[in-house]
Every structure is written in structure tokens, then in C-alpha cells.
């Protein structure tokens, strides 16, 4: 009997092959075949409700990350055909971000690329996200110099540590800084950050 995690992993491998075909098709439509080897696909279980992201890689290229939990949730609720349509729509959306160039956002150039790919330039997906929201762990980060406090997520803490390590290895980049004294945040500061509990806001009045 396969676990939910194992089922999602098997589906991710199958969907990854489908999405790789979309990369090749989309790049050829825009005469950008040279970009095909530099675009990577991955499925993430860390995302909450967003369908996917397009991220710039160090050294060039891009990574398209797709929300695996949302894809699996849609498959169970709406069936394989609708799940495929949602999944592909999200992927075309993120691929257009890479092909439009970093910094294009959802502006005119991104919309132009979406239309050239034969897609409707929608900014948001329409999938049911009920049950996908989870409580996010937070850390209280104190600046090692001025003790300025910041509440950061666990994911942000990990990204900051990875970025600092990357720069300390001799790679190009800008160290994260304290917003008050503008001194660089250190890995020691991040290691000393303590978990905190963020209270849940009350429901809005009707």
C-alpha cells in the first residue's frame, strides 16, 4: 500500500515528463530553443496555495516549481482531465515568466509572451485550495549588533542561511542586512533565532 507521499512522488515523475514537453514546445514557438537546456522543472510540497513559481538560478537559467500538493488535491477533487488542464495552465504561466525575461512580472511583455504561446494571460489559478493552508513556523531573528527584532518564516530563515553560505564560498551576491543598522545578518544570528507563535487573527465581522 503506497503512502500519500509515495503516490505524489510517482505522479510528479510522470507530470515532469509532460511539462518538459511543454518547455520544448513553448521555446520552439518563440524561436528560443537555446533556452531549453537551462530551464528546470521541480515539484514542491512546501508551497501553500500558489500554483507555482519561476525562479532565477545562480549562473543563469530558471527553475519552474509547481505546487505538488495543490496538483494532487485537484486530481482527487476534480478528476484527471481537469487536473491536467489546471497543471498545464500553471506551467505555461510560469514558463512565460522565464521567456519574458526577469523583471517582466505580469506586465505587457509577459502578457505578450502568453498570447504568443496561445494562452490566456490570467494572473491567478482557479483551483480549490481548501485544506492546503497550514500554520507557518516563525522565528524571532535578532540583529547581532543592534538587537533589532524581525519575525521571519522557517522558509525565509533557510533561504537566508543558504544565501549567506553561497556568498561565503566566494560566489557573487549581497548579504541580507538588518533594516535598522544595515549591518549584515550572520549565520550565527539565524542559528540563535528562536521559534515563536504568531496568534491567529480573529475572523472578520459580518
Image (cartoon, helix red, strand yellow):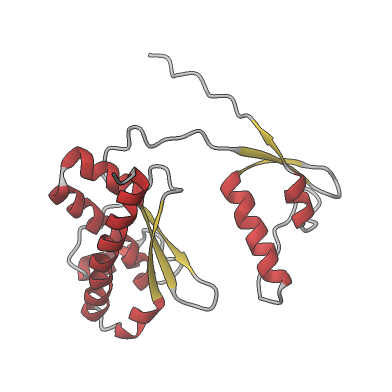
Horizontally, residue 39 falls left or right of residue 173, namely: left
Residue 179 appears in the rendering:
no
Q: Using the image, determine if residue 128 lies above or below residue 6.
A: above
Horizontally, residue 52 falls left or right of residue 72, namely: right
Q: Nearer the viewer, residue 155 or 174?
A: 155
Can you say which quadrant of the picture contains the N terminus? top left
Identity of the residue furthest to the left in this view: 81
Can you say which quadrant of the picture contains the C terminus? top left
Residue at image coords 42%, 35%: 133
Residue 167 x %, y %: 69, 70
Identity of the residue furthest to the front in this view: 1
Q: Using the image, determine if residue 51 lies above or below residue 206.
A: below
Q: Nearer the viewer, residue 79 or 121?
A: 79
In the rendered image, which quarter is residue 20 located in?
Answer: bottom left
Q: Nearer the viewer, residue 92 or 41?
A: 41
Identity of the residue furthest to the right in this view: 145
Residue 171 x %, y %: 67, 76
Residue 111 x %, y %: 29, 63
Horizontally, residue 131 falls left or right of residue 175, namely: left
Residue 135 appears in the rendering:
yes
Q: How many marks?
A: 0
Horizontally, residue 201 falls left or right of residue 168, namely: left
Residue at image coords 20%, 62%: 119
Residue at image coords 71%, 63%: 175
In the rendered image, which quarter is residue 192 located in?
Answer: top right
Q: Using the image, determine if residue 138 lies above or below residue 18.
A: above
Residue at image coords 32%, 66%: 95
Amino acid at each position: 500500500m503506497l503512502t500519500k507521499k509515495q503516490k505524489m512522488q510517482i505522479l510528479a515523475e510522470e507530470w515532469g515528463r509532460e511539462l518538459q514537453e511543454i518547455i520544448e514546445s513553448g521555446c520552439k514557438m518563440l524561436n528560443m530553443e537555446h533556452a531549453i537546456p537551462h530551464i528546470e522543472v521541480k515539484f514542491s510540497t512546501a508551497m501553500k496555495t500558489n500554483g507555482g513559481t519561476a525562479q532565477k538560478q545562480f549562473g543563469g537559467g530558471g527553475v519552474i516549481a509547481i505546487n505538488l500538493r495543490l496538483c494532487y488535491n485537484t486530481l482527487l477533487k476534480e478528476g484527471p482531465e481537469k487536473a491536467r488542464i489546471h497543471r498545464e495552465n500553471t506551467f505555461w504561466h510560469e514558463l512565460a515568466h522565464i521567456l519574458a525575461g526577469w523583471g517582466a512580472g505580469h506586465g505587457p511583455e509577459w502578457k505578450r509572451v502568453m498570447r504568443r504561446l496561445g494562452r490566456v494571460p490570467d494572473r491567478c489559478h482557479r483551483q480549490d485550495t481548501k485544506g492546503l493552508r497550514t500554520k507557518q513556523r516563525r522565528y524571532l531573528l535578532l540583529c547581532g549588533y543592534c538587537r533589532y527584532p524581525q519575525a521571519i518564516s522557517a522558509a525565509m530563515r533557510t533561504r537566508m542561511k543558504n544565501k549567506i553560505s553561497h556568498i561565503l564560498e566566494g560566489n557573487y551576491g549581497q548579504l541580507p542586512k538588518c533594516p535598522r543598522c544595515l549591518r549584515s545578518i550572520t549565520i550565527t544570528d539565524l542559528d540563535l533565532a528562536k521559534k515563536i507563535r504568531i496568534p491567529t487573527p480573529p475572523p472578520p465581522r459580518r
